[in-house]
């Protein structure tokens, strides 16, 4: 019986492959909230989806310095997501993918908004601050304090010395206070505890040093460590992790990443105010690595763009970014089935020589699954893909791509199991189903792929790109930077019609 089922599966896939073969074009795409472009370029990137995946189902509201729970990514940023790193949802658009072969479309080198002159004045220094949750709440935290560090309550009054010498301590809740246990004994601090290092030195969590002040906040029976520091200091620990530590040829790409990451930061400040912080330090927002992540060239990129953001109608945009677009970015309204946003429309991203992100290792990739592994995915991965209808399947029968979006990404994929039960998975969510059976958190690199029979063993996906494909393509930015484009040209190529402006204080 299993062989008969396999034969029927293969026939369906063969037909699907014949339909798709003529219209599929390979091309690349990243998060912020996704793996760094540096890791991606080496072929070692692994995307870890957010726990609160419902946030990936739509674009956030447009009010500056705030957002509703809603993607990256990615994520980004994606920003993160894709980066920043941002994540994703379900699309809705036509079946014929856009042409993405090298030179098929003229590259977009500038937005409709006029570019600022090359001799524009240097950006002014800014002193805006941001609060970053360094990790989720824990029962205890391993902290290090330099000699002379002081502490206070949240009001910042009556600062007192924590210790006259450097100490390593374990912090935990004890009643309505924070207990710091070290070789010097136990010291109690008021909640929420606010700790400031002395003499320009750094506090450390789990041995990782950080700039700024550390706030210890109660969260149930646990403590949440929150770092308060200047936005520009924060970005020094973000840019090299999001786009990679590059050489001088990548300086303009790092500047573009710095402006995109700053834009994401400004727009999303306050989104977790009820929990006492603004952003997470991982792929749920933008990956922040503290002092050890900093790099001299990326820090230069931050300082030379200090205070600059990408704006639309005077407000910071949703600055999503991703790793590899493979020659054309995605339209956010199609990928996430949301209201169209002009600056997040799909744009061609190729020079006459080919895609700007051609150096990416994800210009072409393959994944395979046996029939048994597909059975496993029905239980492990299908629920996270949010199938319609939301029924459970136990035995895989067949799969086919029903239609695709304008840029070639999957719009709808049908999965049949248990004889005749059919479910539809939409848009970027197909990546959640076609995961690694042994590690369901490692989802498919992108939603731009075609399906083929894999001998008589199962199925094969042949695809291109990495990430959701929306907004700035990090590998493309690196290619453009090497070709001599400025960070302004890079940003306005990906975020159409926007302007580079000074952030509001």
Image (spheres, rainbow, N blue to C red):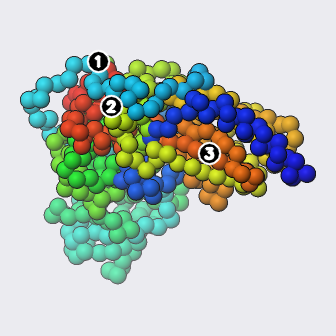
Q: Quadrant of residue 440?
A: bottom right
- In the rendered structure, the answer to whether residue 39 lies left or right of residue 419 reads left
Instruction: Say which of 353 and 231 sits in front.
Output: 353
Give above or below for 266 relative to 276.
above
- Looking at the rendered image, the quarter that the C terminus falls into is top left
**Does label 2 or label 1 sit earlier along the sequence?**
1
Local packing at callout 2 (Cα closer than 10 Å; few below 14, some 14-19, many 20+) is: few
**Disc 1 element:** loop
Which of pointers 3 and 1 indicates the residue nearer the eye?
A: 3
**Does label 3 or label 1 sit earlier along the sequence?**
1
Residue 361 showing in the rendered view: yes
Disc 3 to disc 1, C-alpha distance: 37 Å
Which of pointers 3 and 2 indicates the residue nearer the eye?
A: 2
Give above or below for 113 relative to 379.
above
Give above or below for 192 relative to 75.
below
**Disc 2 element:** loop
Disc 2 to disc 1, C-alpha distance: 21 Å
Residue 189 lies, in percent from the top left, at: 36, 63
Residue 265 showing in the rendered view: no
Residue at figure coordinates x 46%, y 38% from the top left: 27
Instruction: Find out whether the residues at labels 3 and 2 contact each other: C-beta distance under 8 Å.
Output: no
Q: Which residue, given by chain and number where applicable, does mark 3 sit on? A: 461
Q: Which residue, given by chain and number where applicable, does mark 1 sit on? A: 112
Instruction: Say which of 78 and 166 sits in front.
Output: 78
Residue 423 lies, in percent from the top left, at: 75, 35
- In the rendered structure, the answer to whether residue 429 lies left or right of residue 5 reads left
Instruction: Find out whether the residues at labels 2 and 1 contact each other: C-beta distance under 8 Å.
Output: no
Q: Which residue, given by chain and number where applicable, does mark 2 sit on? A: 352
Disc 3 to disc 2, C-alpha distance: 28 Å
Give above or below for 245 relative to 319.
below
Residue at figure coordinates x 57%, y 49% from the top left: 366
């Amino acid at each position: 019986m299993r062989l008969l089922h396999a034969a029927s599966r293969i026939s369906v896939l063969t037909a699907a492959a014949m339909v798709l073969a003529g219209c599929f074009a390979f091309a690349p795409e990243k998060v912020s909230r996704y793996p760094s472009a540096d890791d991606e370029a080496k072929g070692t990137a692994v995307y870890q989806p957010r726990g609160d995946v419902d946030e990936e189902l739509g674009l956030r509201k447009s009010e500056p310095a705030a957002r509703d729970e809603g993607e990256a990514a990615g994520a980004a940023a994606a920003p993160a997501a894709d980066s920043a790193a941002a994540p994703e949802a379900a699309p809705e658009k036509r079946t014929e993918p856009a042409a993405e072969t090298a030179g098929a479309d003229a590259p977009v080198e500038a937005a409709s908004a006029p570019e600022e002159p090359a001799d524009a004045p240097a950006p002014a220094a800014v002193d805006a601050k941001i609060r970053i949750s360094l990790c989720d709440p824990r029962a205890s935290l391993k902290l290090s304090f330099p000699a002379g560090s002081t502490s206070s309550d949240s009001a910042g009054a009556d600062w007192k010395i924590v210790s006259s010498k450097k100490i390593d301590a374990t912090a935990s809740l004890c009643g309505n206070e924070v207990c710091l246990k070290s070789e010097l004994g136990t010291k109690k601090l008021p909640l929420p505890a606010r700790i400031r290092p002395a003499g320009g030195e750094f506090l450390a969590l789990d041995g990782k040093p950080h700039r700024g002040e550390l706030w210890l906040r109660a969260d149930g029976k646990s403590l949440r460590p929150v770092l308060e520091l200047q936005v520009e200091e924060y970005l020094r620990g973000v840019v090299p992790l999001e786009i990679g530590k590059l050489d001088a040829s990548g300086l303009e790409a790092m500047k573009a990443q710095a402006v995109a990451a700053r834009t994401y930061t400004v727009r999303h400040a306050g989104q977790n105010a009820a929990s006492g912080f603004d952003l997470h330090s991982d792929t749920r927002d933008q990956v922040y690595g503290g002092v050890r992540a900093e790099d001299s060239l990326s820090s230069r990129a931050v300082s030379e763009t200090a205070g600059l953001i990408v704006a639309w109608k005077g407000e910071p945009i949703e600055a999503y970014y991703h790793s590899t677009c493979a020659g054309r970015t995605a339209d956010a309204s199609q990928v996430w089935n949301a209201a169209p946003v002009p600056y997040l429309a799909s744009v061609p991203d190729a020079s006459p020589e080919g895609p700007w992100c051609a150096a990416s290792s994800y210009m072409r990739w393959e994944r395979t699954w046996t029939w048994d592994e597909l059975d496993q995915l029905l239980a492990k991965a299908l629920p996270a893909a949010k199938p319609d209808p939301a029924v459970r399947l136990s035995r895989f029968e067949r799969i086919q791509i029903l239609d695709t979006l304008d840029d070639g990404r999957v719009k709808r994929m049908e999965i049949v199991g248990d004889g005749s039960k059919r479910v539809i998975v939409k848009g970027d969510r197909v990546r959640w189903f076609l995961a690694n059976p042994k590690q369901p958190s490692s989802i498919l690199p992108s939603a731009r792929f075609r399906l083929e029979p894999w001998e008589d063993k199962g199925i094969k996906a042949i695809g291109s790109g990495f990430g959701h494909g929306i907004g700035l393509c990090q590998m493309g930015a690196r290619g453009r930077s090497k070709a001599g484009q400025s960070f302004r040209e890079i940003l306005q190529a990906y975020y159409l019609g926007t302007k580079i402006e000074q952030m509001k204080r």
